[in-house]
Each structure stands twice: as C-alpha cells, then as structure tokens.
Image (cartoon, rainbow, N blue to C red):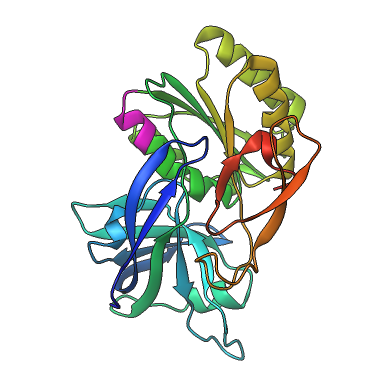
C-alpha cells in the first residue's frame, strides 16, 4: 500500500462529511461469482483505509489483462457493500468491456489493486425519516450502501428496483435483509414504465413523506426525480458514472456540464470524480 492521501471534501448540499483517507489498497480476492448471465459479485479482503468508504464513493480498480485486452487506465467502480467486521469490500459489476472482462478472470487468492475510497457520496438529511432509492441495472450496486446506511440511522427506506426482466433484478434479498422495503418493477410486464413509477412514488409520499429521493442507472429516472423533487419539494440526489483518468480531479478527463443552480439556465463544468460522483439531481443535466 502506498502512503495514504488525506482528502477534505463536502457532501452534496454543502454538508461536510469530513476528512477521509485515500490509498492504493492491495486487496486479496475472496470470491468472484456470477449472480446472473451478465453480472458478477466480487468480494475483497481490504486494508483498514478502504473500509472507511462512504455510501456513493467509489474505488479506482487496476483491472488485469484478459486475452487480447490489456486495460491501460484504471476503472471506477462503485462500492456495493462494506463489512468492517469481516474486513471486506464488495463490488457488483456487469461484464461488458475490457476492464470488466479482466475483473471476471480474478480467482480466490489473487490480488487486486483498488485505489480509494474516492469522491463525494450521498448526504443523508439530519433526522431523515423516509428515503427513496430508485435504481436500474448497474445502479442497483451503487444504491445498496445508502439503503443500509439510512436504515442504520433510523430512516425507512423504500427501494424501487428496475430491470429488463425478473431474472436481472439484483440486490433484492440483500436490501430486504438490511431493512429496506423493496418494490420490483421490470420491462416484461410494463411495471417499469416511468408513469407507473412516478404514481407509486406519489402514493408512497402521501403515506409517509420522503425526505430524500435518490437514483442511479437511468437518464429517465434522473428526469423523473427532477420532476418529483420539484412537485413534492423534496431534495434529490443522483450518482453518476463516467470514464475517468486519475480519479483525483487533476486530469479533468471526467468533466461534465451542470446547471449552476437548480433553476439556473447558466451552465458550469464539474469533475465527476472529485466534485461527485453524487450530485444534486436538479443541477444535473444528464445521467
């Protein structure tokens, strides 16, 4: 492990989340199993620095070569789970490119270089009573730590999980095990239609108002939370994905446009790696 870097950052909305260390963590592979036809679940034994990761933060992984693939840059990967007691961090990833094909070759006993934790995570409002987690596809992995974190702090969490088919829905059992209330929707029966989802959120809000709306994994979900956030007067946050170079804000390879305010027509540019990856949904232009 290299000498750690001490970062000082603030969570979205200006709430300070304090200093957190960043280091190049050499992690032992505990398991790397398929969970369905597209996704694998990677469990790593990690140093103490890595276990300080917060919901919404990520690690920059040095993916091994696979066949003719030899990834030059690291790959950003959102945390799926962390267990301080077991000393492990976990990732849920879709095998679809050179980097993830390399990750898929890892076997128990091997080693993976995981730089992090990096970035700004979710900001849970003080005294939050009800949090919405709305996710699809790979976004399901990003949102799982937030659900566990919110429940542990006394909030009710409603998680709406979306996928193309029931076979591709992930994290349902895990989210239920940490105390979240789970609603599964999918394309095959049309329940994932955005009009239907927005109707559900309004009904849930009428029963117990949401204090925070969160999403990851879909541009239409981002747009839905922008509408619902304004209509219900509830803050909304979105976790973004983006290719990046250094993950420390120095190379500016992951810069994207954002509104300068929720209702502003003026635009500015922010680094997804360092200013995010979690942002105010009303200021975010696209997922």
In the rendered image, the residue lying farthest to the left is 85
Location of residue 151 in the rendering, given as x and y in whole percent from the top left corner: 35, 29
Number of on-image labels: 0
Location of residue 231 in the rendering, given as x and y in whole percent from the top left corner: 70, 17
Q: Is residue 51 shown left or right of residue 159?
A: left
Residue drawn at (39%, 64%) of the image:
116
Q: Quadrant of residue 230?
A: top right
Location of residue 42 in the rendering, given as x and y in whole percent from the top left corner: 40, 64
Residue drawn at (57%, 26%) of the image:
235
Residue nearest the observer in this picture, 182 or 87: 87
Magenta extent? 149-154
- Is residue 143 visible in the rendered image? The answer is yes
Residue 74 magenta-drawn?
no
Residue drawn at (41%, 18%) of the image:
129
Q: Is residue 281 shown left or right of residue 131?
A: right
Q: Residue 30, relative to residue 128: is it above or below?
A: below
Q: Is residue 49 shown left or right of residue 107?
A: left
Location of residue 179 in the rendering, given as x and y in whole percent from the top left corner: 35, 29
- Is residue 170 visible in the rendered image? The answer is no
In the rendered image, the residue lying farthest to the bottom is 68
Rendered-image quadrant of the N terminus? bottom left
Q: Residue 24, relative to residue 146: is it above or below?
A: below
In the rendered image, the residue lying farthest to the top is 207
In the rendered image, the residue lying farthest to the right is 265
Q: Which SS does the magenta portion mostly show? A: helix
Residue nearest the observer in this picture, 34 or 162: 162
Residue nearest the observer in this picture, 105 or 133: 133
């Amino acid at each position: 492990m290299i000498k750690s870097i001490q970062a000082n950052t603030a969570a979205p909305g200006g709430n300070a989340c304090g200093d957190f260390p960043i280091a190049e963590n050499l992690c032992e592979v505990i398991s790397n199993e398929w969970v369905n036809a597209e996704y694998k679940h990677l469990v790593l034994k990690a140093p103490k620095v890595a276990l300080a990761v917060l919901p919404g933060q990520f690690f920059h992984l040095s993916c091994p070569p696979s066949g003719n693939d030899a990834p030059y840059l690291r790959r950003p990967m959102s945390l799926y789970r962390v267990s301080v007691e077991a000393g492990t961090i976990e990732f849920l990833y879709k095998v679809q490119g050179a980097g993830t094909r390399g990750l898929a070759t890892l076997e128990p006993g091997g080693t993976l270089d995981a730089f992090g934790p990096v970035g700004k995570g979710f900001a849970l409002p003080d005294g939050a009573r009800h949090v919405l987690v709305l996710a699809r596809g790979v976004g399901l992995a990003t949102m799982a730590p937030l659900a566990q974190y919110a429940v542990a702090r006394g909030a009710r969490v409603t998680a709406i999980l979306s996928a193309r088919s029931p076979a591709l829905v992930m994290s349902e059992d895990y989210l239920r095990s940490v105390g979240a209330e789970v609603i599964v929707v999918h394309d095959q029966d049309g329940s994932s239609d955005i009009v239907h989802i927005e109707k559900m959120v309004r009904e849930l809000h009428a029963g117990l108002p949401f204090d925070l709306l969160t999403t990851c994994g879909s541009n239409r979900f981002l747009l839905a939370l922008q509408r619902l956030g304004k209509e219900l007067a509830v803050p909304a946050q979105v976790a973004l994905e983006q290719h990046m170079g250094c993950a420390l804000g120095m190379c500016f390879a992951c810069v994207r446009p954002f509104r300068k305010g929720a209702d502003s027509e003026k635009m500015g540019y922010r680094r997804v790696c360092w200013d995010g990856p979690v942002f105010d949904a009303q200021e975010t232009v696209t997922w």
